[in-house]
């Protein structure tokens, strides 16, 4: 049975925990004599309906560093379903490559691709989730928290969109304490909140969803934000700027956080909107460590989907 990574929920809490361990191990051996290249002769097709820096570069590099190859499936920015149907695209790709990553507008498109090919499909961001981002985020939190992990408090301030949804699920699965503050009308969809609460009940995690950034940030160890206007929402920019005005991550808001706190952002940042220069360039910011971890986290995702037996063996080694 092939396995996809369309949602954080496609992996069990134990599998997510193993991904974080594996990502850390892959980071520790990178470019050393212990590094591995198990994917010789295997290839990945990358499909991007929307722009990307981090996701595109890190997926290509992840495949190359694992000994394989990655290629752009079609010119970036082309909407799927125009030149040929999404199922036809999937049925072609599966004849040539071994795995596909897709960044698309609609979750339905990524699911249609997955349903029509016998290859693993990785969601490189859609309107519902950004699961690879969430794995790198929690890898970063885990590194910074050390032995305290997972007993840390995270605050997510801003749009209840793809990044927030995946964060809700992974924090719930792994038992973190997450407080989300969004303007009224921009809260995450109820299905993600409800699923996160169910996961929390099993993991011992905690979830607060509110409209007050101060309430969410008070005492937080990690403060995370995302853009107010995501890709594809450009027509809503003015309304969003109005709605999110009091949700900026700035020095005043951070004065409420735990003394030793860290600032995260999935990037790209719209400086001066959701985050100030002072904060993103300041001593608490770890946004570039987080961006670096996209590479290691995605290597772990790729190996878990393409060679689960090897991934399991490496997780055991990493856990020793
Ligand atoms: N964070 C993230 O996915 O960045 P890109 O849009 O540049 O891929
Ligand atoms: N929410 C943002 C994330 C970018 C990585 C977007 O969808 O544009």
Image (tube, helix red, strand yellow):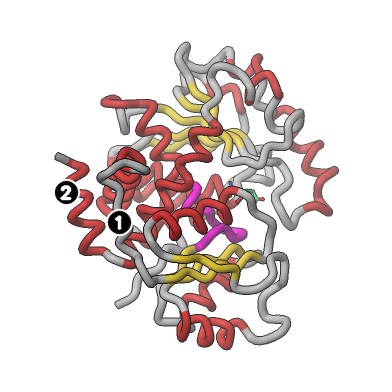
Image quarter in which the N terminus is found: bottom left
Q: Compare residues 114 and 306 and report the one nearer the observer.
A: 306
Which of 282/134 is in front? 282
Image height of 268 relative to 7, above or below: above
Q: Secondary structure at mark 2?
A: helix
Q: Is residue 208 left or right of residue 239?
A: left
Which stretch is magenta? 123-133
From the Cβ of disc 1, is ligand 1 less than 8 Å away? Answer: no
Looking at the image, tell me whether mark 1 or mark 2 is earlier in sequence order. 1
For the image shown, how many numbered marks are present on the structure? 2
Read off the residue under disc 2.
316
- State whether the magenta stretch is mostly helix, strand or loop: loop
Residue 13: horizontal and vertical position, in percent? 29, 51
Which residue is denoted by mark 1 in the rendering?
Answer: 12
Estimate the spatial distance between the alpha carbons at disc 1 and disc 2, rounded to whole Å.
17 Å
Q: Is residue 319 left or right of residue 4?
A: left
Q: Is residue 71 visible?
A: yes
Q: Residue at x 33, y 67 (%)?
A: 306
Residue 132 is a magenta residue: yes
Comparing marks 1 and 2, which lies closer to the viewer?
2
Q: Are marks 1 and 2 in contact (CB under 8 Å)?
A: no
């Amino acid at each position: 049975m092939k396995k996809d990574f369309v949602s954080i929920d496609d992996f069990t809490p134990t599998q997510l925990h193993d991904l974080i361990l594996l990502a850390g191990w892959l980071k520790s051996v990178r470019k050393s004599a212990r590094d591995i290249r198990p994917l010789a002769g295997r290839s990945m097709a990358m499909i991007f309906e929307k722009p990307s820096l981090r996701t595109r570069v890190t997926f290509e590099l992840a495949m190359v560093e694992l000994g394989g190859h990655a290629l752009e499936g079609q010119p970036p920015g082309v909407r799927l379903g125009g030149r040929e149907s999404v199922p036809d695209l999937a049925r072609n790709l599966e004849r040539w490559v071994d795995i596909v990553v897709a960044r698309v507008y609609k979750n339905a498109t990524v699911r249609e691709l997955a349903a029509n090919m016998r290859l693993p499909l990785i969601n490189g961001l859609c309107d519902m989730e950004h699961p690879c981002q969430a794995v790198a985020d929690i890898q970063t939190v885990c590194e910074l928290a050390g032995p305290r992990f997972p007993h840390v408090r995270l605050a997510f301030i801003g749009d209840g969109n793809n990044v927030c949804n995946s964060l809700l699920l992974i924090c719930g699965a792994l038992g973190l304490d997450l407080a989300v503050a969004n303007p009224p009308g921009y809260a995450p969809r109820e299905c993600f909140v409800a699923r996160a609460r169910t996961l929390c009940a099993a993991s011992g995690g905690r979830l607060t969803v509110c409209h007050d950034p101060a309430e969410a940030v008070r005492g937080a160890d990690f403060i995370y934000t995302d853009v107010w206007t995501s890709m594809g929402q450009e027509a809503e920019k003015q309304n969003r700027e109005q709605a999110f005005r009091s949700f900026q991550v700035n020095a005043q808001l951070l004065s409420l956080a735990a003394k030793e706190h860290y600032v995260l952002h999935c990037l790209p940042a719209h400086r001066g909107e959701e985050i100030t220069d002072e904060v993103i360039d300041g001593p608490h910011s770890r946004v570039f460590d987080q961006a670096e971890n996209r590479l290691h986290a995605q290597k772990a995702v790729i190996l878990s989907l393409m060679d689960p037996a090897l991934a399991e063996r490496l997780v055991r080694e990493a856990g020793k």
